[in-house]
Image (cartoon, rainbow, N blue to C red):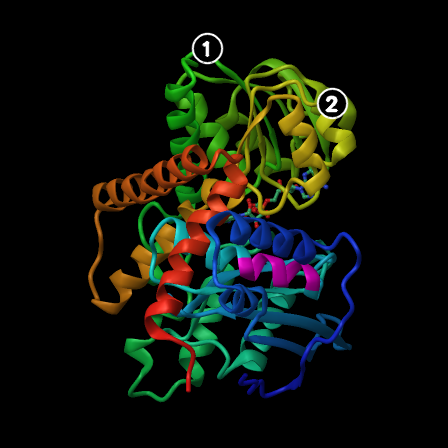
């Protein structure tokens, strides 16, 4: 284990809560291991993270005062390639959450056959409480604190909740400013999800939502549901939720209800493109003219064909799963369903496209951006779109095939596909020394 943070670095030894995200994730890995009869020592390796880095760093506020902030970067596994995973800004960021998200990144890349490992990071802040110059200083100081623990062929961050292309540009600029001048032009791929003009790739912005929609399209074909005229609801109207909604709407599906951090709305002719413009203007979806406000429970109970959770974890619990009135849950968010929620969905015959497959479009196109930067070229949108489609549907087909051959639910099947891929490499390479 290497921890080289230039600021205070501590290894996490916190005790897990009984129903932690990491516990749920490890329970799934063990279930998959029993099904595919995996070597217990390899499963043990995969249940552990490689490095857990916590940094505490000072940031100057606009009024001249200094505030101390805490950030994490957790690297789970790099047997398939460099560590890869997003960075989120959220007051709820904690080690258990980031650890589970890092493990899921390893699985995602394994399922869609991308040569990346898994990592995740975050800063425990409410970004709404900081000005833009403050957010820039926070991002740069966190990057400085992590220096040596991220790198273009070692650990590559990307956007996640409350971070975006601008934040990635600040990370890239800080990293490149600290690099030796000889390495600067070979290090742009230290982060993906950058703005187009700063080394980003066409199509990255919509990639996760596009991947969600490819999975929904394939599921709809397999289940005889024409998407023209189909109905859906979406929780979270940020990058993943708004892109999934716009792309599904383009295919003729109708958005009946949406929820974000400001509230929930429903209406019979919600236009996702218009709703996004409203959200950008006002800061949230509430008060969108073609809608009326509804409660959280009414939102969840809205009858529709498809529900896309695209916000945070632990939204579909044993209680809320009882309220859902849909045929399919397509998990745009990471970890939106608890293990008890899963059991209720299964008992009620509601299909799930699991997060580690459904939202893998982001890491797929991040991989293309990384390749593009390494070779100093620019990919066309056609090349990105075709690559995304074939990678995510390849993963989809592998998960469906594993589900059929082992007679298990889609989430378990996705864990089996990922575990088989990772275990194979460990069998071939062995454990050093
Ligand atoms: P984002 O910050 O762009 O959007 C988050 C949305 O969730 C916002 O609309 C916000 O208002 C809403 N939200 C927050 N708290 C909520 C609550 N309590 N109830 C309802 N809505 C709430 O984030 P994003 O990048 O779209 O990420 C959303 C999810 O997708 C996360 O789980 C993330 O890990 C996952 N994901 C994102 C990407 C990506 O490329 N951005 C890739 C894979 C997975």
> At which x and y percent is residue 414?
47, 44
Can you say whether 25 is above or below 428 in the image? above
| Image mark for residue 323 | 2
Regarding mark 2 in the picture, which secondary structure is present there? helix
Q: Which residue is mark 1?
A: 229
The reply to whether the magenta stretch includes residue 371 is: no
Q: Residue at x 44, y 25 (%)?
A: 248
Regarding mark 1 in the picture, which secondary structure is present there? loop
The reply to whether the magenta stretch includes residue 101 is: yes
Quadrant placement of the C terminus = bottom left
Kindly report the distance in space between the C-alpha atoms of the residues bearing marks 1 and 2. Answer: 23 Å
> At which x and y percent is residue 397?
35, 36
Secondary structure predominantly adopted by residues drawn in magenta:
helix
In the visual, does 421 lie left or right of 264?
left
- Asked if disc 1 and disc 2 are in contact, CB closer than 8 Å, the reply is no
Q: Along the line of sight, which residue is nearer the eye, 34 or 224?
A: 34
Which badge, 1 or 2, comes first in the chain's sequence? 1
Q: Which residues are magenta?
A: 96-103
Of badges 1 and 2, nearer the viewer stands 2
């Amino acid at each position: 284990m290497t921890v080289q943070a230039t600021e205070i670095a501590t290894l996490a030894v916190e005790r897990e809560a009984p129903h932690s995200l990491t516990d749920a994730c490890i329970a799934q890995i063990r279930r998959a291991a029993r099904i595919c009869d995996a070597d217990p020592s390899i499963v043990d390796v995969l249940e552990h993270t490689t490095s857990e880095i916590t940094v505490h760093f000072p940031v100057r506020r606009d009024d001249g005062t200094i505030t101390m902030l805490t950030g994490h970067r957790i690297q789970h596994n790099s047997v398939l390639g460099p560590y890869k995973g997003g960075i989120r800004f959220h007051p709820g960021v904690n080690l258990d959450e980031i650890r589970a998200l890092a493990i899921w990144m390893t699985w995602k890349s394994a399922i869609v056959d991308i040569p990346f490992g898994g990592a995740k990071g975050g800063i425990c802040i409410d970004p709404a409480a900081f000005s833009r110059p403050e957010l820039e200083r926070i991002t740069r100081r966190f990057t400085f604190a992590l220096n040596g623990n991220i790198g273009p062929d070692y650990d590559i961050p990307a956007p996640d909740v409350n971070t975006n292309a601008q934040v990635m540009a600040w990370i890239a600029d800080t990293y490149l400013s600290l690099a030796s001048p000889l390495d600067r032009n070979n290090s742009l791929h230290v982060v993906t999800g950058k703005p187009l003009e700063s080394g980003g790739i066409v199509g990255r912005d919509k990639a996760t939502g596009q991947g969600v929609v490819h999975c929904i399209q394939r599921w709809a074909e397999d289940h005889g549901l024409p998407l023209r005229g189909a109905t859906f609801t979406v929780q979270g109207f940020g990058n993943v939720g708004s892109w999934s909604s716009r792309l599904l709407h383009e295919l003729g599906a109708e958005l009946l209800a949406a929820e974000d951090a400001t509230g929930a709305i429903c209406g019979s002719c919600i236009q996702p493109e218009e709703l996004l413009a409203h959200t950008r203007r006002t800061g949230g979806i509430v008060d969108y003219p073609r809608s009326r406000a509804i409660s959280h429970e009414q939102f969840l109970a809205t009858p529709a064909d498809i529900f896309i959770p695209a916000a945070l974890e632990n939204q579909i619990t044993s209680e809320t799963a009882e309220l859902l009135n849909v045929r399919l849950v397509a998990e745009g968010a990471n970890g939106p369903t608890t293990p008890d929620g899963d059991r209720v969905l299964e008992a009620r015959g509601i299909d799930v496209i699991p997060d580690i497959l459904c939202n893998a479009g982001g890491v797929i196109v991040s991989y293309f951006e990384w390749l593009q930067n390494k070779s100093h070229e620019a990919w066309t949108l056609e090349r990105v779109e075709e690559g995304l489609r074939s990678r995510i549907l390849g993963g989809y087909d592998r998960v469906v095939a594993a589900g059929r051959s082992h007679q298990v639910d889609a989430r378990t099947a996705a864990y089996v596909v990922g575990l088989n891929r990772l275990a194979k490499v460990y069998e071939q390479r062995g454990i050093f020394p």
